[in-house]
Every structure is written in structure tokens, then in C-alpha cells.
Image (cartoon, coloured by chain):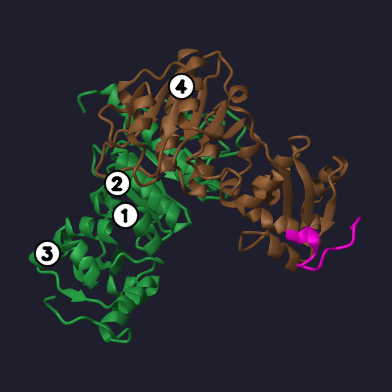
Chain colours: A brown, B green
Amino acid sequence: MAVPELTNTKSPRVKAAKRLAKRAFRERDRAFLAEGPQAVREALSSPGVVTELFATADAEARHGDIVAAARAAGVPVFGASGEVMSELAQTVTPQGLLAVCRFVHVPLAEAVPPGTGLVAVLTHVRDPGNAGTVLRTADAAGADAVVFTDASVDPYNGKCVRASAGSLFHLPVVTGTPVADAVARLKSAGLRVFAADGSAEGTLDDVDLSGPAAWLFGNEAWGLPKDVLELADEVVRVPIYGRAESLNLATAAAVCLYASARAQRAASPEG
Amino acid sequence: MAVPELTNTKSPRVKAAKRLAKRAFRERDRAFLAEGPQAVREALSSPGVVTELFATADAEARHGDIVAAARAAGVPVFGASGEVMSELAQTVTPQGLLAVCRFVHVPLAEAVPPGTGLVAVLTHVRDPGNAGTVLRTADAAGADAVVFTDASVDPYNGKCVRASAGSLFHLPVVTGTPVADAVARLKSAGLRVFAADGSAEGTLDDVDLSGPAAWLFGNEAWGLPKDVLELADEVVRVPIYGRAESLNLATAAAVCLYASARAQRAASPEG
């Protein structure tokens, strides 16, 4: 190791990183934690995002390429004892790599320029695992941006970061925006705004999805509030062809986002 | 309450129900537990499935209709103290209703008659939450059956039952079948067998999904083994239009099942 191993869970450096598990400290430091080899690798692929890397000796042996990439990028790498890693990590079986990262979100106007094709908006989504899964799915579906409104969970919550499987670092993410501002911007950028809500009369099968689209996804239990439904150009639901009462949020979002992505590509195959 | 409340967590009746949390006892008794108002309501909608219902006084007050439906169906209802319910329930905040249910799975040939339109097959799926979510999604997409192969998690695992949100009781479920037997039956019933695998060259966009289809979904981490891929008529992946490395299992399954369901309906709209 290039640096002495941190073994004291009470050391100032360990304490400074650990408190980033709390939103108030993340906001103050404008920093968050990314855990595990996949997230750390993706974070390092965006220059200037990772400001510190903690690695156990085991993890350095297993993921020498990641640690080397950090060092090559000038990121300070700290050896961490197993005890220190357990103190920092939020998973039961930490994989020995944990990065302190600068906030990566961007302003709404930057994330949604004119000509944007596909955007996911999370509003009143409360479960960070769901939010991260939708972020990952939006990335897979080729979305241009994901917007977390001010009524949604923090995208930098550790569970959200982990569930996003690196996608937090792949596409522009906006956070803390009032939903009305987000919708206004999306409309002015030329996107049709669809609200996905289980109570809608019309379904995915009834609408033309070939053009630029933004999708509003709501709360896990109760969907979208009336004032948000009224902001949308269309309110649709995923059709239930069988007897299930509903779909879970991440599943419904996957069906909507892929339906848009595939319809857009079918309409302009060279895109 | 019509019956005295069970307050002793060591009583034979409580112990007999509690051990159904373990697969070996489920197999021996050919019975499993369904927890919470939604699952119990759905279980009661299939005659003869529920053999005992445990209800706290609180739950009986909140869900009188469910308890009354059980009594009307001749199901013995046992009052349960909060302590007994906590002993029986697998969730941290049990909702006070728990049913002992008979196994509901059916033979493969019964679940997949000639003319079947859409089937999901889970093989090597290990996480019960994922399996239950796929079952719920298959139900929503109008699948005719869901097959759990002998290399997959037990559909009666408590987490799977909960994640299925009642869908375990909605459509024919097969369990413990060798994957080769399942595929042979699906083909002989006239379905085209698609294997969903992230390593495939072709994608959903390259295949004709308008006909009867079965989808094979594999392990969360490593997908489908080579011998299973070779059984399929076609191996396809969900297209990744963005930078995500992959989709999670339940999300990929949702995209595939809905792509089939929507294509089948577009091909014969009156269906």
C-alpha cells in the first residue's frame, strides 16, 4: 500500500466519510458515498467526481485496476482495515471499496436542452431502492436525463446509489426541482409529458409514443397527486391484461420507458 | 371473536404454522403461509386453498370483510395475540392476518394446454423477491402460466408469496419441473421459446413477437446456462440503448413479457 492503513474507526477521516450516510452532511459537504467495485469504477470514469478512495488490502488485490485508475487520476487512496470498512460501508458484506464523490447533478436547463428525446421524472418516490432501479432502467432505455423532484428521495442516498448500479454517473441527473418547474421545462424543450398512473383510463396502447417524451412516475403506494396529473399532457397506465391489481413502480417504469424508446426507434430507425 | 385468542407462542397450533417458514416442513405438509390482507383476500378467492386463518383483534376490526369471508367459507379462524402474530409473521410490521394455505401448483400439462399464449419460466432464479415480482408482472401481462424449474427458488417462500402481491393465486403455477421438460411441453403446445439473456446478439427489436411465446428467465447474476440457451428457439436480450451495463432480472422480465403481450394484442386486437 502506498499509504498507511487506517485502522481507527474514530479517526477524523473515517468519521468525515461515515457521516455522509446522513443527508444533512451530504448537503453540507456536497458529497456522497459510492460503494463497491462497479459504482467506484463508474464514478472514476467521470473526471473530478471521486475525491477519496478507501480500499481494504483484499479489495486492492482483487480490484488492482480500479485502485490504479484512482491513483492515476490523482485521487488519494487510503488503505482501510476490515473494521474501518465495516464502519463506513452500508451493506452487510462490503466489498472493500468505497469512494467519496462530489455531487454530480446538473441544473434542469442543462439536463433538458431543446431536442431532448426521453426523460424520466420521479416525484414523491420514497423508496431509494426503487428510485435507483428506475434510474438504472432509464439509463438502459437510453433516457437523456432523470429528474428527482423536491418531493422525492435523495438520489445520493446509499441505497439509491447502489440500486442505480453506476447509472447515477452515466446520464444527467437533476435533483430538488419542483415538479411544476420540471414539467414547464420539459414542455418548452418539445417533449410530450406523460404521467404514469394506475388510475388512468387510457393505457400505453392508446397513445402515440413515437415522439420525444417525458414520463412522470409517482409514489409507490398512491401514485401521483391530482395537481401533478393536471400538469401532464396525457395520463396513462400500463395495461393490466391479467388479474394483478397493479405493477410495482420500477416494473411499470420499465414498461413505459421501453415502450417509448422502442416506439421512437421504430419511427426513426437510423436514430 | 368466535374462538378464544391464542396467546401462547409455544402452542402446538402456532408451532405447526410457524415451521412452514421452512421449505422442508412446507414440502411435508404441502402447505405454506400467506401474510397480510391482500394475500389472504386473494387466497380466499380460490375455494379450498386456505385451511386456517390467524387474525389479531386489530386486524379483525380493520379487515372484518376478510375474516367474515373466511368464516363463510368454513375456514377455522383463530384469534392471535400480538405476540403470537409476531412469532408467525415474517415481516417486521405484520398486518395481523396470516393464512395457512394448501399448495396451489398444478401439473405442467394442465398449466400449458395447446393454445396457450404466454408463459414465463424461471430457472436458476435464486432471490425469492425477484421471483415473486416476476410472477406479479407475468400476471399483469396476462400470462397464462408461470413455471418455476427445479433449479429455482421455491414459489412458496414467504418473500416470494409477498412479492407476488396475490398473483400466486391468480394464474396456474408449476414448480419443480426440469427445464428441459418445461421447454419440450411449451414447444409441443405451439409456443415459441425465447431465452432472455444479456449476452445474446439479437434483441427484442429483431424478433417477431406476435405469436404464442414462452420466456425463459435466468439467474440474477449470471443469466442462463449454455444447455438452457440451446433449448430455446431464440436467444434475445433487452436492448440497452444507453450506458447501463444491464437491467435487473425483474425489470428485464417486465420489458420482455409486455413486449410479447402488446405485440400479440396488436396482431389480433379483438383477442
The front one of A239 and A182 is A182
Q: Residue placed at 18% from the left, 59% from the top?
A: B44
Disc 4 from disc 2: Cα separation: 33 Å
Apparent side of residue A220 relative to residue A101 in the rendered image (left or right): left
* Tag 4 subunit: A
The front one of A136 and B160 is A136
- Which portion, as a residue range, is magenta? A1-15
The front one of A3 and B11 is A3
* Residue type beneath disc 1: Val
* Tag 1 subunit: B
Disc 3 from disc 4: Cα separation: 47 Å
Q: Quadrant of residue B192?
A: top left
* Same-subunit check for callouts 3 and 2: yes
Q: Which mark is residue B174?
A: 1
Disc 1 from disc 4: Cα separation: 39 Å
* Same-subunit check for callouts 3 and 4: no
The residue that label 3 is drawn on is B68
The residue that label 4 is drawn on is A213
Q: Is residue A38 among the parts visible in the rendering?
A: no
Numbered disc total: 4
* Residue type beneath disc 2: Ala
Q: Residue placed at 40% from the left, 61% from the top?
A: B159
* Residue type beneath disc 3: Ala
